Every structure is written in structure tokens, then in C-alpha cells.
Image: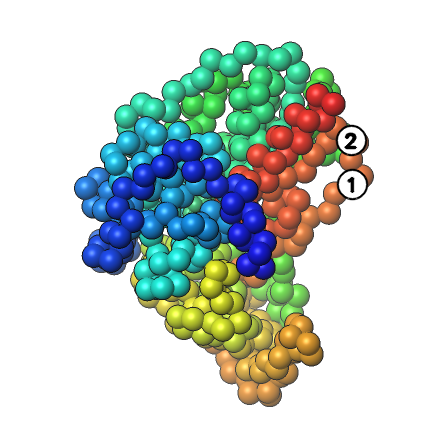
Amino acid sequence: MYKEIINTSHKLSTKKYNKDMGNPKAFLTIPRQEAGYRPIHDRISDYSEVEQTLNSRDRKLQASRCMDCGVPFCHWACPLGNKQPEFQDAIYKGKWEEAYKILNETNDFPEFTGRICPALCEKSCVLKLSMDSPVTIRENEAAIAEAAFREGYIKPRNIERNGRKVAVIGAGPAGLAAANQLNGKGYTVTVFDKNEAPGGLLRYGIPNFKLHKPIIDRRIRVMEEEGIHFKMNSDVDVRQLPEGFDAYCICTGAPTARDLPVPGRELKGIHPALDMLAQQNRILAGMTFPKEQLVTAKGKKVLVIGGGDTGSDCIGTSNRQGAVSVTQIEIMPQPPVGQNPATPWPQFPIVLKTTSSHEEGCSRLWSLATRKFLGKNGKVCGVEVEQVEWTPGPDSGRPAMKPTGKVEVIEADLVLLAMGFLKPEHPQFAENVFVAGDAASGASLVVRAIASGRKAATDIDSYLNK
Ligand SMILES: Cc1cc2nc3c(=O)[nH]c(=O)nc-3n(C[C@H](O)[C@H](O)[C@H](O)COP(=O)(O)OP(=O)(O)OC[C@H]3O[C@@H](n4cnc5c(N)ncnc54)[C@H](O)[C@@H]3O)c2cc1C
Ligand code: SF4
């Protein structure tokens, strides 16, 4: 693996911006400083972004901590191949516009990744290995994006058209990245989406307290001014694609949530997580729903099934809606705290993650399998769970689950299922149809969706020019 990292990093990292790194020893005296979250009492009753920002002086100091390693593992770890050492150096020298240009070469939407990327790069930073305090790469990225919008470095481009048309189906981060890249190459791009506004899960999944929706609107405005057409409320049948386009990019995401077909599943009060998350984001955008359609945690004992990020978003949303209690259960065992020998540096560490939503209040339980939902008058009132044990699989393969017979009941009058999404299946498409984002990979991350949308744009361009 190391050979691959070194080869890839040398191949991809260009040092053209960075002949004399500003202060390669700054990390010895300047500690990592995160902007941190707003205090819990302040943030718990609103949906504004929880993360704060540093002033530009402190931001420069943080950027100065980058050592400009010979092999930038951060660059290897980022699915976009962002050139982190180069943009850190530009920030350190106060060259914000240059920092934006470097970042924008590889990332269409740093204002999204700068807010919600799990920062794969930081886990691979050499300062993570040596002092467990990586450079604040993600926050620095967000700071560059904000400076670029604030200072007017991001302006609609005048693009010469090449006479070809491409349809993008799905306006999530993959579709937006594909559209942005293709538009930049001169194609006339139309983006179709069944939702009322673009953004995909950025808008109708990820809570506002992680990503404020005007951040999406601001980017869409630039894209529209550059000539991209958005056709919203357009549910496209991918077996009958709209006519009149030279190529198509299918970016329809991974919309089918994994269900839990155990006895009692039909009871009222059991919902896929997105029923609640998408509805809450729509309510914040001004939509209203009849009372009987509301999925609300107000005054309820909430049980979230699934220990991942979607589950964490349900916790933050439930607490804001006024839940009486929130419990999150996970079938897998609790991951190790801090370090995990199974995922050594520079890999992404599988360790216990405590999000801002966890901090706001919830119980977390592991190694619990759900046996059945319990109900009263047709409504869920609890869940019967069983402790399970996990034993390592042969040849370090998939671990085996063993029931222990230890059963307990967790009271709940709202159950949210956050157990991931099924990998989408597609019909055999014609050769001018390309698939990107979660629609191609299965549920993943925003940064991977953007990378995949960019790759699809390159493939479409090569196809149309072959
Ligand atoms: C609750 C939640 C929280 C998440 N939090 C994070 C996070 O913090 N960080 C992170 O990196 N990732 C996060 N993710 C994952 C991330 O949101 C996805 O990986 C990413 O949005 C995938 O992008 P995409 O463009 O492939 O698909 P999507 O964002 O799902 O977009 C697909 C779009 O296609 C449209 N569409 C589907 N079918 C059709 C059709 N037939 N016709 C027209 N339009 C159609 C949909 O309306 C949608 O707008 C989260 C996911 C969830 C569910
Ligand atoms: S997109 Fe994510 S992985 Fe890449 S540099 Fe930004 S924070 Fe790091």
C-alpha cells in the first residue's frame, strides 16, 4: 500500500505553487486549534450551523502548521486529490485568491466539503501520526471558500458553447459536479431533478445545523448565471431518457433505505430516517405539512436504530424538535476509542466517533439486534432487543454474529431506521449514458460523489470527442 501511496502522491501532487514553503516548523510551536461548536445551550434550540469559524489571523496560523511533507498523504487520502500543502501555504502567505484557485482546480464545491466532509485527509496527515493533531484541512478549506464568495473571486464565467447538449439526471453533489465540469467545457447542460430544489441529500438529508441551505442556493445561482438549466419537479424515467441530448449522466443517488422487516414493523411511529430529516429541512424552507403527516420527536421517547452518521443526524434533529429522550442502538460492537490497530495510519480509522449531535444528549448502546417492535393500539411503544456477540471471521473475513439470549425492551414511541441504503441497480444503458455518485457506488460521501461526477464529466467529454 505504501508504494502505491508514494507513487500516486508524487504523480498527482504538483509543487508548482510552492517552491518555498512558508514556515515548515510552525507545527512545533502552534497547536491545532479547531473553531469548535457553538455552546450546547445556545445551539440546541435552533437549526443554525453548529460549527464556528476562526478569525483570519488564527486561520493563517493553522495553515502554517502544514509541513509540506515530501509525500503528502492528505492528498492521497482525498478522493478529489485536493492539493492541501499548496493551499495551506497560500493561506499562510495571505494569498486567499491563489488558495481558492488551487482548491478550485480539484474541487467544484469546497463550501460543501469544507463543512461536512469527514476529512479523510486529516486522518492521513503526518501530524496525525506524529502528534495526533493534524492540520485543520477541512476548516481551512471552508475558510477559503467563504473568502472566495465574500471577496468576489467566484464570478460567473463566460463560456464558449461547443454545440453539444448533455442531460444530468439528479441534482445532488454528483450531478452538480458533473454539470459544472461539462458546462465549463462548453456543453449546454440541463439538470433534471424530481425534487423542488437542487442539492439532493445536501438539501433534503443533511440537517441545516450541519449545512445551512443558502450555501447551496448561492452556488446554484452562480451555476445558473453560467448557463446551466435546472429543471426541477422532473421525475425522469431512466429507461426513457429525455430526447435531444448527446449524452446523459445519471446521478440519482441511492434512494432506497434498508428496512428492518421484523414483527411489528407495520406499527405507526416507525419511519426511515429520511422521512424525518427531509421533512424537517422542508419545514425550515417554509413548507407546511398536515398534522397527521408530521414525523416529529416532540414529547416522544425516540429510538434511533443505526449507529452511523444518518443516525447521528436523527439525534440532533430529535433533540431540536423536543424529544423527551433519545437512544441510539447499533448491532455492531462499540469501536475502539482513539486508535484502532485494525486501521492503522494513514488509513481512515474505524474508531468511536462522537458528533456534535451526540454531545447534545443521547444514550448510545452497541451490540444490540432488534428482535421485534412492540405496540399498543397500533402504535409503537417499544422495541425488543437482544445482546449479540461478534467473533472474528476466518482469515480476517466478515465477523460472525452470535445471539446471547439476553433480551431487553427499550421504550420508544418514535423509531427511526438509519441502517444505510441499498446499492441501486440500473438497466443496461446505451453507450452515451454514464452513471455517477451514489447511483454508481452505493451510499457514500459528498466528496466521493463530487469526485465521481467530475470523472463522469471527463468520460462524457472523451466519449463525445472520440
Ligand atoms: C442523512 C444523511 C446525512 C449525510 N451526511 C453526510 C455528511 O455529513 N458528509 C458526507 O460526506 N456525506 C454525508 N451523507 C452522504 C451524502 O449525502 C451522499 O453520499 C451524497 O449526497 C451522494 O450524492 P449524489 O449526488 O450521488 O446523490 P444524492 O445527493 O442522493 O442526489 C440524488 C438526486 O437525484 C434525484 N433523483 C433521483 N431519482 C430521480 C429521477 N428518477 N428523476 C429525477 N431526479 C431524480 C434526487 O431527487 C436527488 O436530488 C449523508 C447522507 C445522509 C442520508
Ligand atoms: S474534500 Fe475532504 S478529504 Fe478532501 S481535502 Fe477537503 S476535507 Fe480533506
* Image point (53%, 33%), residue name: 177
Q: Nearer the viewer, residue 240 or 20?
A: 20
Crowd tier of the residue under label 2, counting other residues whose Cα lies within 10 Å: few below 14, some 14–19, many 20 or above: few
Amino acid at dot 2:
Glu
Crowd tier of the residue under label 1, counting other residues whose Cα lies within 10 Å: few below 14, some 14–19, many 20 or above: few
Amino acid at dot 1:
Pro
Name the residue beneath numbered marker 2. 431
Can residue 132 be seen here? The reply is: yes
Q: Is residue 148 above or below residue 25?
A: above
Q: Is residue 395 above or below residue 463?
A: below
* Image point (57%, 34%), residue name: 454
Instruction: Please state which of the two labelled residues, at mark 1 or mark 2, is closer to the viewer.
Output: 2
Residue 427 position within the rendered picture, expressed as x and y whole percent measured from the top left: 78, 41
* Image point (65%, 18%), residue name: 165
Residue 333 position within the rendered picture, expressed as x and y whole percent measured from the top left: 52, 76
Q: Check contact, mark 1 vs mark 2: CB within 8 A.
A: no
Q: Nearer the viewer, residue 7 or 152?
A: 7
* Image point (37%, 47%), residue name: 68
Can residue 256 be seen here? The reply is: no
The answer to whether residue 383 is left or right of residue 247 is left
Mark 2 residue element:
loop
Marker disc for residue 427: 1
Pick out the residue farthest to the front: 19
Protein image colouring? rainbow
